[in-house]
């Protein structure tokens, strides 16, 4: 029995030695020799363990060595790779990243009862009395999946973005996932699959994007808008669709997600430029047309910092020729400029746009008189946000204007919108790194060229999560 115990102890010591690495073989043999000399191991036990050690050493030397582990971008050597946001996994030379957002708000909209004096064609203020809803804000939820790697010296990526709303939609009404809402039992929400694109680029070259993603014109206006994280103007609160309007139509035209081939330069002293060819868009309210040429968009951005002051400046443009089937062809165009300046706890934003044949609120909405005669439009918004600890306080004002094409247009469309405007007051509380709580008050007004006017006031309270 004692011999068996001695053999087991020595075997344990031996096993620890040979499994560490083949380089430990000499050290293990010396240890067995000392145990034998002290009488702990018999001659037979010593020879048995020594023979086993020699056999294990030969097998370890013959086995292929494990490939070296290459540290990932986080500096570690594990399978999970840290990413700037979301959840990232490193698998071989491919990074698979998941990121997303979920939000929901209680929104109460106090609109006017319908009357002959508050009819505004193209207005965004609510007409129809009080409404309440539990709904998404300007953003629906989203889940983005990206696969990125470096192949042949090029950084390449595949990007997919699914944007599901929490409200039920009515597909029969048109508009797909963003159709008017259908707040009834046994309905389903909609999924707006608005991002599907590939990218490839490398240092010194820039990046090429091919697929469906956010446009260039007016993209900075919405991405820097404080209502992007909240509600803004509700629009259709009695039967909510996937999103509210935010400040769309009361300060800028919605950039939209569009099929495109876009090239973005590397940064030169903080300056980057993007230019792209885009799927031509037909007018939403104009005459039938055949689009023979693509649309073009471009954007210039400067990011800089001087001491404690950070600055982001931008300018963008859009142009597209519309080939009208029965009527004059026309070319729609527009440009916008803006600035975002941060100093200490305060950030201010200002934007302005001017356009012709581009419409208002959405691209090519009310862009012509219906015969191909262009309408001009312009707008702006001003915004401030101050952050103190976990609390942020923000406010903004903006408006969008639409002009008549000509005198005949004024006679034919007397109630056409002249101006949509809104005031926004907002409070945020950063619950943690994932969740932000928000409360908001929004006052919206729509005015027609003939003097008709509609106004509505809304409150929103809820939360948004990003991971």
Image (tube, rainbow, N blue to C red):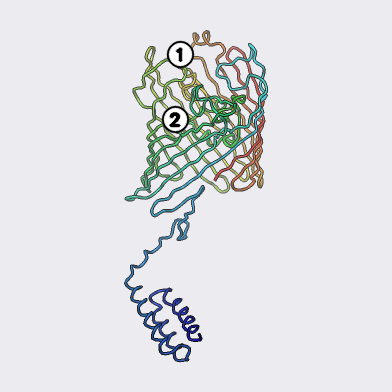
Up/down of 122 relative to 88, above or below: above
Up/down of 152 relative to 380, above or below: below
Which residue position is annotated with label 2?
317
Query: Secondary structure under badge 2?
Result: strand
Q: x, y (%) of residue 231? A: 60, 32
Q: x, y (%) of residue 330? A: 40, 18
Name the residue at the front extreme.
1
Q: Which mark is residue 169?
A: none
Q: x, y (%) of residue 60? A: 36, 73
* Residue 451: quarter of image: top right
Q: Is residue 247 visible?
A: no
Residues at discs 1 and 2 in contact (Cβ within 8 Å): no
Q: Residue at x 34, y 73 (%)?
A: 59
Q: Nearer the viewer, mark 1 or mark 2?
A: 1
Query: Secondary structure under badge 1?
Result: loop
**Label located before the other in sequence (1 or 2):** 2
Q: Is residue 217 visible?
A: yes
Q: Residues within 10 Å of mark 1 (few under 14, many from 20)?
A: some
Q: x, y (%) of residue 406? A: 48, 11
Q: Residues within 10 Å of mark 2 (few under 14, many from 20)?
A: many
Up/down of 390 relative to 175, above or below: below
Q: Residue at x 50, y 32 (%)?
A: 337
Q: Residue at x 57, y 14 (%)?
A: 449
Q: Nearer the viewer, residue 451 or 465?
A: 465
* Residue 195: quarter of image: top left
Q: Nearer the viewer, residue 183 or 103?
A: 183
Which residue position is annotated with label 1?
370
Q: Residue at x 40, y 40 (%)?
A: 264
Tell whether 375 sits left or right of 443: left
Mark 1 to mark 2 CA distance (whole Å) = 24 Å
């Amino acid at each position: 029995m004692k011999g068996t115990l001695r053999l087991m102890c020595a075997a344990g010591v031996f096993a620890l030695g040979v499994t560490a690495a083949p380089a430990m073989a000499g050290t293990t043999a010396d240890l067995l020799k000392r145990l034998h000399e002290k009488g702990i191991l018999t001659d037979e036990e010593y020879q048995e363990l020594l023979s086993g050690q020699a056999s294990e050493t030969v097998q370890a030397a013959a086995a292929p060595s494990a490939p070296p582990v290459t540290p990932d971008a986080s500096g570690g050597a594990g399978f999970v790779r840290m990413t700037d946001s979301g959840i990232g996994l490193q698998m071989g030379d491919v990074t698979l990243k998941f990121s997303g957002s979920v939000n929901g708000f209680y929104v109460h909209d106090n609109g006017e009862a319908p009357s002959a004096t508050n009819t505004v064609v193209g207005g965004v203020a609510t007409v129809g009395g009080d409404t309440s809803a539990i709904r998404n804000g300007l953003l629906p939820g989203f889940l983005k999946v990206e696969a990125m790697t470096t192949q042949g010296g090029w950084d390449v990526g595949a990007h997919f973005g699914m944007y599901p709303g929490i409200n039920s939609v009515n597909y029969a009404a048109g508009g797909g996932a963003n159709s008017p809402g259908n707040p009834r039992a046994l309905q389903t929400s909609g999924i707006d699959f608005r991002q599907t694109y590939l990218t490839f680029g490398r240092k010194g070259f820039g990046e090429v994007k091919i697929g469906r993603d956010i446009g260039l014109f007016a993209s900075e206006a919405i991405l820097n808008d404080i209502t992007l994280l909240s509600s803004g103007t509700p629009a259709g609160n009695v039967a909510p669709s996937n999103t509210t309007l935010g400040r769309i139509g009361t300060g800028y035209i919605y950039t939209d997600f569009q099929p495109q081939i876009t090239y973005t330069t590397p940064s030169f002293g903080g300056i980057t430029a993007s230019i792209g060819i885009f799927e031509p868009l037909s007018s939403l309210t104009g005459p039938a047309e055949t689009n023979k040429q693509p649309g073009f968009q471009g954007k210039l951005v400067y990011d800089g910092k001087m001491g404690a002051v950070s600055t982001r400046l931008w300018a963008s443009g859009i142009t597209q020729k519309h080939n009208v089937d029965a009527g004059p062809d026309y070319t729609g165009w527009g440009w916008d400029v803006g600035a975002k300046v941060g100093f200490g706890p305060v950030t201010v934003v200002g934007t302005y746009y001017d356009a012709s044949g581009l419409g208002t609120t959405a691209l090519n909405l009310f862009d012509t008189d219906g015969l191909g005669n262009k309408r001009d439009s312009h707008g702006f918004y001003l915004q401030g946000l101050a952050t103190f600890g976990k609390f942020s306080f923000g406010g903004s004002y903006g408006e969008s204007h639409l002009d008549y094409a000509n005198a005949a247009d004024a006679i034919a469309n007397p109630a056409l919108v002249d101006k949509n405007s809104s005031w926004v007051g907002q409070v945020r509380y950063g619950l943690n790194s994932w969740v932000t709580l928000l409360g908001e008050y929004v006052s919206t007004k729509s005015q027609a060229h003939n003097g008709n006017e509609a106004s509505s006031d809304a409150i929103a309270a809820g939360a948004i999560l990003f991971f």
